[in-house]
Image (spheres, helix red, strand yellow):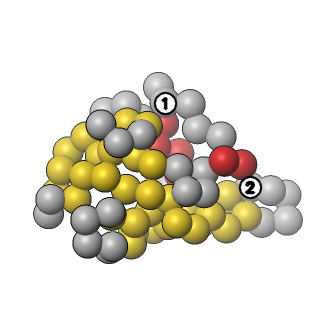
Amino acid sequence: MNRVNPKVLLHSKWTKVSVENREKHFVITEVEFDEQKNVIECLITAVINHNAYSINWRDLKQPTLWRFGWQ
């Protein structure tokens, strides 16, 4: 399991395990918190074409889906 701290998500780099549309490397470009400091929205952007996707930040913990850093 990948360790993910919501406080340091912004600008972190991720590699998607299953590549789709040649999108493999991503950067977290936006993280929105509520009043209790819980993540309510997380945007991840593909490096190759700048497509942005809203994801559940907890999915980043799954090593079958994501790897920390660019690999």
Query: Is residue 57 in sight in this rendering?
Result: yes
Image quarter where the C terminus lies is top left
Q: Kindly report the distance in space between the C-alpha atoms of the residues bearing marks 1 and 2.
A: 19 Å
Which mark, residue 68? none
Q: Secondary structure at mark 2?
A: loop
| 56 vs 25, nearest the viewer | 25
Q: Residue at x 37, y 31 (%)?
A: 63
| Residue corresponding to mark 2 | 38
Q: Residue furthest top?
A: 1
The kind of residue tagged 1 is: Asn
Q: Is residue 60 above or below residue 44?
A: above
To which quarter of the image does residue 23 belong? bottom left
Spot occupied by residue 67 in the image (x, y as percentages of width and height): 37, 36
| Residue corresponding to mark 1 | 2
Q: Tell me which numbered mark, 1 or 2, is placed earlier along the sequence.
A: 1
To which quarter of the image does residue 35 belong? bottom right
Q: Residue furthest right?
A: 35
Query: Is residue 65 in sight in this rendering?
Result: no
The kind of residue tagged 2 is: Asn
Spot occupied by residue 39 in the image (x, y as percentages of width and height): 67, 58
Q: Marks 1 and 2: CB-CB under 8 Å?
A: no
Question: Would residue 21 be found to the left or right of residue 7 on screen?
Answer: left
Q: Residue at x 43, y 37 (%)?
A: 68
Question: Would residue 44 be found to the left or right of residue 47 on screen?
Answer: right
Q: Secondary structure at mark 1?
A: loop
Q: Callout 2 environment at 10 Å: few (<14), some (14 to 19), or many (20+)?
A: few
Q: Residue furthest left?
A: 21
